[in-house]
Amino acid sequence: MIIGCSHGTYLAKKIARNLNAQYLPLTVGKFPDNELYIRFNKSPKNKNVVLVQSFYGNINDCVVEVLFAAATARDLGAKKIALAAPHFPYLRQDRRFNPGECISIKALSGLINRHFDKVFIVAPHLHRQAKLSGLFKIPAVNISANNCIADYIKKTIKNPMIVGPDWESHKWAQKVAEQIGCDYLILRKKRHSGRKVKVTSNQKIRIDNKTIVLVDDIISTGNTILEAVKKLRKLGAKNFHCIAVHGIFVENALEKLRKASVRVVTTNTIPNNVSKIDVSKLISKKLI
Ligand code: R5P
């Protein structure tokens, strides 16, 4: 039984269709004082239940919703309960940087461990943990979106040069370039704050007539990509595309990127106007 949570219905429907499984939208409402109301309209008794929820917008409501839904499914007799998260939050704060801080991912994964039997996450932003399994006690599956990004670039962009805006991006930018069989370049980024970054390069760069395709996992404020474009423009690059997995786009990021003549496309882990790359098949395959 594939359950579409409030921020997962668009993908849950596709996943259910791909798997020929029963689809059920979760009823989610709010009381006047903002408390959440959750209801299963069909019984999940003896079913293997997959809750599909992407965590964007009001992330904390999304979290409470899946915890309540999983607890309810368990209460109603579901056999196994999995969480399929196209975009999963709170992965950045994976250690205590200052005394007394909450290690957010540890707190959240503890709750997920308690309520779910398995978790599937598309392109989780892993920092100091090399593997997703290091963050969860239940089986945790990392679903890479590299294949669909490489396919999209192959089909739509001629003569690409893939650029990763920071060293971490080698995990997706370099991998995507290797799959396409084209040149790539990994830049360096120094983050000064949530909004301020500086992008540099320690390599000799030959742009020639290549179309620059920046590949990153997340676009949030867009500043990482804007800074990378600034740097590459100084070196003679003219055509810019940017392909990202999760298009969060806060503070008019998409508008800013358009103004800088960057053509942006993302996957549909978070639905938006440019989420043209579908990840439903990737998720479906892993659920089997
Ligand atoms: C960070 O390391 C990620 O890979 C992205 O580069 C980052 O989240 C992008 O954030 P922003 O768009 O705010 O620069």
Image: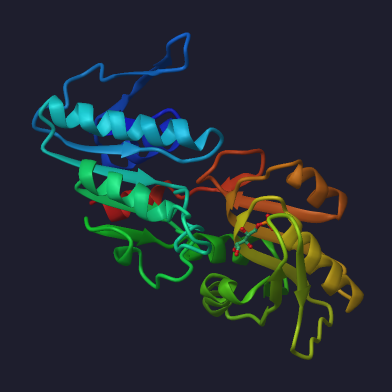
- 144 vs 226, left or right, is left
Residue 70 visible to an observer of this rendering: yes
Considering every residue shown, the one lying at the far top of the view is 32
Q: In which quadrant will I find the N terminus?
A: top left
Considering every residue shown, the one lying at the far bottom of the view is 204
Residue that appears at 44% across and 47% down: 86
Foreground residue, 225 or 111? 111
Query: Could you tell me residue 131's position as x and y percent?
Result: 36, 69
Residue that appears at 73% across and 54% down: 222
- 259 vs 138, left or right, is right
Q: Quadrant of residue 82?
A: top left
Query: Could you tell me residue 48's position as x and y percent?
Result: 16, 38
Query: Could you tell me residue 227's position as x and y percent?
Result: 80, 65
Which quadrant of the figure shows ligand 1?
bottom right
Q: Quadrant of residue 245?
A: bottom right
Q: Is residue 132 above or below residue 108?
A: below
Q: How many marks?
A: 0
Query: Could you tell me residue 124's position as x and y percent?
Result: 45, 58
Foreground residue, 6 or 21? 6
Q: Is residue 227 above or below residue 59?
A: below
Foreground residue, 8 or 238? 8
